[in-house]
């Protein structure tokens, strides 16, 4: 039986969080961007959830957000018919790319030179960020709004999922469809794992894994509730999923067994992603919060500290008996220690 | 009693007074030179950068002084969609995203207090 999870709740958004993305691992750690219907996407430190800044400028709900690997650039897709590129260090808006309808998805190439966008106008666009005034390359074919468009196969191909219940693989140069998958219902989310070329797709209560190059199905797993998003751990030993029943589920990728389920959110879970080091996963919900969950519950990492039994009691005893400090300092220290002890105890008692 | 996980503190939330991106953070200081886009085009010559930075400081200071000079004066704003309004300028917010104005004269009447969205403003003029 595993330990209870104490997720870290990141507040700040005032409306549902609909998308989130991690950067790669940089010399300053890794970062997390969240897209929210309040129109104000936020950048956070990835391992602690600490707020770094808010990208101000969109005039409508932000549906998609992404960071480049180095976390120096951010891109957002919004209901104000624009996609914006931002400097993720200063928070300044760098580029506004006008579209003809709501933009839902944005994705950088590995070298951050091109931006892929997709949205309700059913067209996939490729912008060269070194020549932003140039007309973007357009890829047409989808017959309904595009939910997600991602670079794959070393940025030579594009994967797109749309409300027309298809997932299509396109060649970047010819802009032709290479392969297509059709489903009985709309795909709710898509994640691409370059290392191993795995595609994670969710629809209904199913989490499906495909080979990203051939679009051959690897396996499917069914969850107890309708799933909105899933993410595969970098080591491919587990995956997490969340959806309509507000819970986060953790499954063993090899055996397809449901290992854990965690309550915490007060609304449906819209997006879930593993951090680049796999130590935690972040979930965004209709309740307007982001929560960070530990992959290995009980480990000391980020803001989580594993407290061994007897540790708290020992701290207090040492301080009360014969401490070589003045009475005044002793009392204020004792107050602090008691405070910490109470916090630790109540955390155990909370559901 | 089994080991349990405690939380050192909650994640820090947004600062209500600004948009963040602390210029004193190690990341900002280390990566900042590359964010002066004009410099990266002409090459990172340190003398050129210093000159450019000096010029930017002068311009920024002049701009801030114009904002001070504008306080409580009648300002004509020329905005998108052929909008021309006049108001008494009050203040700007820290990121120059909104201007607080009073007695805003609009085609449909005078608004006692209003906020003008700066990104909608093309130009503004006032008498010194």
Image: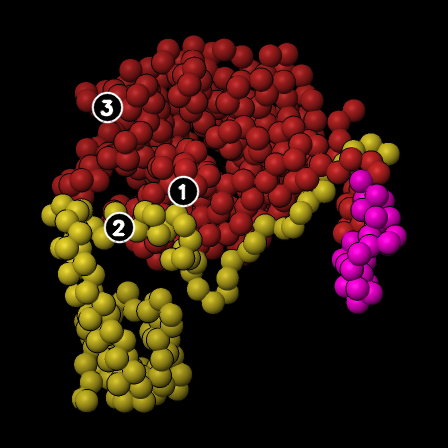
Chain colours: A red, B yellow
Disc 3 sits on a residue from what chain? A
The picture places residue B95, in percent across and down from the top left corner, at: 35, 66
Residue A56, percent across and down? Answer: 38, 57
Query: Which residue in the protein does label 2 denote?
Result: B33
Q: What count of labels does the image hold?
A: 3
Q: Are marks 3 and 2 in contact (CB under 8 Å)?
A: no
Residue under label 3, please give it.
A172
Viewer-nearest of discs 1 and 2: 2
Pointer 3 and pointer 2 on the same chain: no
Indicate the position of residue A154 as horizontal and vertical percent values.
30, 21
Q: Quadrant of the N terminus of chain B?
A: top right
> Do circles 3 and 1 both sit on a common chain?
yes
* Distance Cα–Cα, label 1 vs label 2: 25 Å
Contact? badges 3 and 1 (CB < 8 Å): no
Kind of element beneath mark 2: helix
- Residue located 32% across and 19% down the image: A153
The quarter holding residue A204 reads top right
Residue A147 sits in quarter: top left
Residue furthest out toward the front: A324
Residue that numbered label 1 is attached to: A65
Q: Nearer the viewer, mark 3 or mark 2?
A: 2
Q: Residue at x 40, y 57 (%)?
A: B24
Specify the segment rendered in magenta.
A311-337
Q: For label 3, count other residues whose C-alpha is less than 10 Å away and answer few (under 14), some (14-19) or many (20+).
A: some
Closest to the observer: A121 or A5?
A: A5
């Amino acid at each position: 039986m595993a330990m209870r999870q104490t997720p870290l709740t990141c507040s700040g958004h005032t409306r549902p969080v609909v998308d989130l993305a991690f950067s790669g691992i940089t010399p300053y750690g890794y970062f997390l961007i969240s897209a929210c219907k309040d129109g104000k996407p936020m950048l956070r430190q990835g391992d602690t959830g600490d707020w770094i800044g808010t990208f101000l400028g969109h005039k409508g709900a932000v549906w998609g957000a992404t960071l480049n690997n180095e976390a120096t650039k951010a891109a957002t897709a919004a209901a104000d018919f624009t996609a914006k590129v931002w400097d993720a260090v200063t928070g300044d808006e760098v580029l506004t790319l006008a579209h003809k309808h709501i933009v839902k998805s944005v994705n950088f190439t590995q070298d951050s030179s091109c931006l892929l966008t997709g949205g309700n106008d059913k067209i996939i666009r490729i912008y060269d960020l070194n020549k932003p005034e140039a007309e973007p390359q357009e890829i047409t074919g989808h017959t309904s709004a595009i939910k997600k468009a991602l670079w794959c196969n070393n940025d030579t191909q594009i994967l797109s999922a749309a409300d027309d219940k298809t997932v299509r693989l396109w060649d970047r140069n010819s802009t032709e469809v290479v392969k297509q998958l059709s489903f009985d219902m709309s795909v709710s989310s898509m994640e691409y794992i370059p290392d191993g070329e795995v595609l994670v797709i969710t629809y209904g209560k199913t989490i499906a894994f495909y080979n990203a190059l051939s679009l051959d199905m690897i396996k499917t797993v069914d969850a107890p509730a309708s799933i909105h998003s899933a993410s595969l751990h970098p080591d491919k030993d587990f995956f997490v999923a969340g959806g309509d029943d507000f819970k986060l589920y953790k499954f063993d990728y090899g055996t397809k067994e449901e290992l854990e389920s965690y309550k915490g959110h007060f609304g449906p879970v819209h997006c879930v992603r593993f951090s680049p080091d796999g130590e935690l996963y972040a979930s965004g919900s209709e309740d307007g919060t982001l929560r960070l969950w530990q992959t290995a519950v009980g480990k000391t990492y980020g803001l989580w500290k594993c407290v061994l039994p007897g540790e708290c009691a020992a701290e207090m005893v040492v301080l009360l008996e014969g401490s070589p400090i003045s009475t005044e300092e002793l009392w204020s220290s004792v107050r602090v220690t008691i405070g910490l002890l109470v916090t630790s105890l109540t955390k155990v008692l909370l559901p | 009693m089994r080991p349990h996980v405690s939380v050192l503190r909650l994640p820090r939330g947004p600062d209500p007074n600004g948009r963040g991106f602390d210029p004193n953070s190690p990341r900002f200081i280390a990566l900042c030179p590359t964010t002066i886009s004009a410099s990266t085009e002409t090459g990172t010559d340190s003398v050129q950068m210093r000159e450019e930075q000096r010029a930017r400081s002068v311009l920024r200071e002049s701009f801030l002084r114009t904002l001070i000079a504008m306080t409580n004066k009648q300002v004509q704003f020329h905005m998108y969609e052929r909008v021309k309004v006049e108001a008494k300028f009050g203040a700007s917010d820290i990121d120059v995203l909104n201007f607080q104005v009073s007695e805003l004269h609009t085609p449909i009447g005078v608004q006692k207090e209003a906020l003008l969205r700066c990104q909608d403003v093309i130009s503004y003029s006032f008498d010194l």
